Amino acid sequence: MARKPMIAGNWKMYKTSGEGAILMQALESSVSSMWDRVDVVVCPPFTALKSVSTVIELDRLNIGLGAQDCHWEQDGAFTGAISTRMLTELRCDHVIVGHSERREMFGDTDQNVNKKVKAVFAAGMVPIMCCGETLNVHEAGDAESYVRAQVRAGLEGLTVDQAESVIVAYEPIWAIGTGRTPTPEVANDVARTIRATIGAMFGPPAAMEARVLYGGSVKPENAVMFLREPDIDGALVGGAALNADSFTEIIEAAL
Ligand code: PGA
């Protein structure tokens, strides 16, 4: 089966609850005509999940709702953390796990990322697991082996069914929010390596089914270039997801 393209918006620490609802209403008309050909997911901050979820429900939008992180335990003394149980109650269906900003600033390790990926699946949601190399690793020509190790560690111990539905976002750290990007060919090479790694771990059907997104300075002007690469199934969009027009243009590019 051909993989359905996915465009996911990572709002990061932007948009209050009210601002998130307004952005959703602005997205509504454009997205509703395209949902059967592209999966659209928005990932607001925790505090905006409820208001965004309400707009999705009331207006019957075919837009997925994702969180930007979670804890791997169900409950407990983890001040400031949010569990998958809290996210499913708000109708989340996806969770971004292991974003480089969480790895760099909040101490996410490959081991924690793996626990979170499993917790997300156990709760019936789908993880969008991020991986990607630093500028130093990139310049040393080691991006593929670096990313392969992240994917191996992050997806370790999943079932084949889980591996078939997993989403991996390749986000070179030096491309995030910088306006710099790898060439589409280079991004596709890494995406192919990710797919091959999934294949080596879980077998060819998982490699065929799992979706690999590219992220890092995706804009309306460059989206088509990445999205037409054979191993890139969509995009994880940061800055350009905060504006209804630019996010819509990227969704259109996926078609
Ligand atoms: P950017 O962020 O599109 O603003 O580069 C992407 C991301 O961090 O997911």
Image: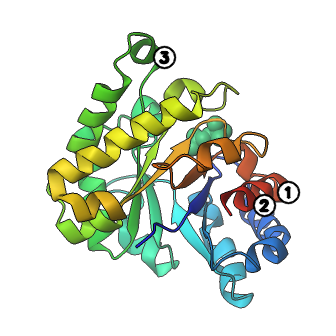
For label 1, the SS is helix
Residue assigned mark 3: 135
Indicate how the structure is coloured in the image. rainbow
State the CA–CA distance, disc 1 to disc 3. 31 Å
- The quarter of the rendered structure image containing the C terminus is bottom right
Circle 1/circle 2 CB separation < 8 Å: yes
- Amino acid marked by disc 2: Thr
Which mark is first along the chain, 3 or 1? 3
Task: Please state which of residues 87 and 222 is positioned toward the viewer in this rendering.
Answer: 222
State the CA–CA distance, disc 1 to disc 2. 5 Å
Any mark on residue 245, and which?
A: 1
Above or below residue 123? Residue 148 is above
Q: Residue at x 69, y 45 (%)?
A: 223
Residue 51, given in percent of the width and then of the height, sits at 69, 74
Cβ of mark 3 under 8 A from ligand 1: no
| Direction from residue 207 to residue 241 in the image, left or right | right
- The quarter of the rendered structure image containing the N terminus is bottom left
Residue assigned mark 2: 248
Residue 190, given in percent of the width and then of the height, sits at 40, 35
For label 2, the SS is helix
Mark 1 neighbour class, 10 Å CA radius: few under 14, some 14 to 19, many 20 or more: some
Above or below residue 61? Residue 11 is above
